[in-house]
Amino acid sequence: MPVANLIDGRAIASQIQGETAQRVTALKARGVEPGLVFVRVGEDPASRVYVGMKEKVSSQLGIRSETKILPESATEEQLLALVAQLNADSRVHGILVQAPLPRHIRETVIYSAVLPEKDVDGFHPVNVGKLMLGDPNGFWPCTPAGVLELLVRSGVKIEGAEAVILGRGNIVGKPMAAILCQKSKQANATVTICHSQTRDIKSHCRRADILIAAMGVAKFVTADMVKPGAVVVDVGVNRVNDPAAKGGSRLVGDVDFEAVQPIAGKITPNPGGVGPMTIAMLMQNTVRAAELATGS
Ligand SMILES: Nc1nc2c(c(=O)[nH]1)N[C@@H](CN(C=O)c1ccc(C(=O)N[C@@H](CCC(=O)O)C(=O)O)cc1)CN2
């Protein structure tokens, strides 16, 4: 039976993908085929799955995509050479280097090498800077951008709300904070970031009208941490052992869903919440990159 207060990420992602598909059709009518290249280094099983999912959605929307695979032993120089080649290719509008990279490759060096106008991941310092400055011309990282869309399209009032973010990572926590406090009718929240050194995290969480969990600790958010009626968004992806599951493990979020769902005003399931939005926003960024590159 469907849960009444569920924020359905799959349905919202599919709505956004429908909008993106229309923009692809418009681009193609002008002779532009949006192109996206994924770069995967090594054989991390989760990365293989995620890149496969992105390839599938690209093809469903009519975006030409290709995956370049380098071996785990590839050097930083080899990866930089590939990025330079993709930067120079005018058929490629978006470049995505899948994280995590092998330990001997510095992610910051690689993300800084992607041209900002092809950085559909929103990880380049220029795009990070534009987000911080409130300049609408940059690309926002897909996961926090997707969380904003989930909230807006579910009718959550963000303006003036107390938003508490658990986690200060560069991919979710920090950009999420910047997005929610943008000076705009769709944002304008009062934002608190909590992290491993925060004192009395529970009291911060209990103040939250919107609680976003992105710290990477399975079932960290329990019912006693949530104000009744609060909106709870679970960004966590934690693999835990489960002998009963296929492959001996399964994914759980940062929120104890069964305990929190009855008291939350709205809540994202996990899976089926934020994850599909990450991919929908990537496609939206790619089409926008193609439109900007071709003056469409
Ligand atoms: N270059 C990047 N690397 C990574 C990013 C990113 O945004 N850019 N994000 C994550 C992983 N990620 C995309 O790459 C991703 C994770 C999860 C999902 C998703 O839809 N998950 C499903 C469940 C899937 C499953 O069962 O395995 C869900 O939540 O419903 C999409 C994308 C790290 N790397």
Image (tube, helix red, strand yellow):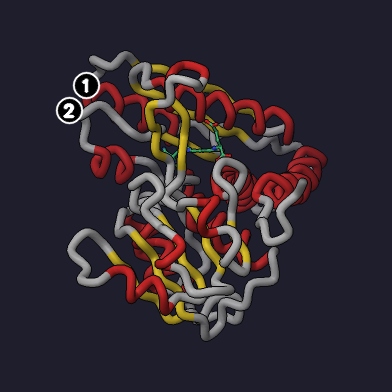
Residue 219 is at least partly visible in this image: yes
Q: Is residue 215 left or right of residue 59?
A: left
Viewer-nearest residue: 87 or 110: 110
Viewer-nearest residue: 86 or 54: 54
Kindly identify the residue that appears in the image at 43 percent across and 25 percent down.
242
- Say which amino acid is labelled 1: Thr
Viewer-nearest residue: 43 or 77: 43
- Say which amino acid is labelled 2: His
Task: Say which quarter of the image contains residue 109.
Answer: top left
Residues at marks 1 and 2, CA–CA distance in whole angstroms: 8 Å
Q: Where residue 202 is drawn, which disc sits there?
A: none
Query: Which residue is the site of mark 2?
Result: 104
Query: Which residue is the site of mark 1?
Result: 75
Kindly identify the residue that appears in the image at 36 percent across and 25 percent down.
82
Q: Earlier in the sequence, mark 1 or mark 2?
A: 1
Quick one: SS at disc 2? loop
**Is 270 placed above or below 178 here?**
above
Task: Say which quarter of the image contains residue 39.
Answer: top left
Kindly identify the residue that appears in the image at 73 percent across and 45 percent down.
14
Viewer-nearest residue: 76 or 149: 149
Pinpoint residue 163: horizontal percent, then vertical percent.
45, 74
**Is 138 placed above or below 61 here?**
below
Quick one: SS at disc 1? loop
Pinpoint residue 208: horizontal percent, then vertical percent.
45, 75
**Is 281 placed above or below 178 here?**
above
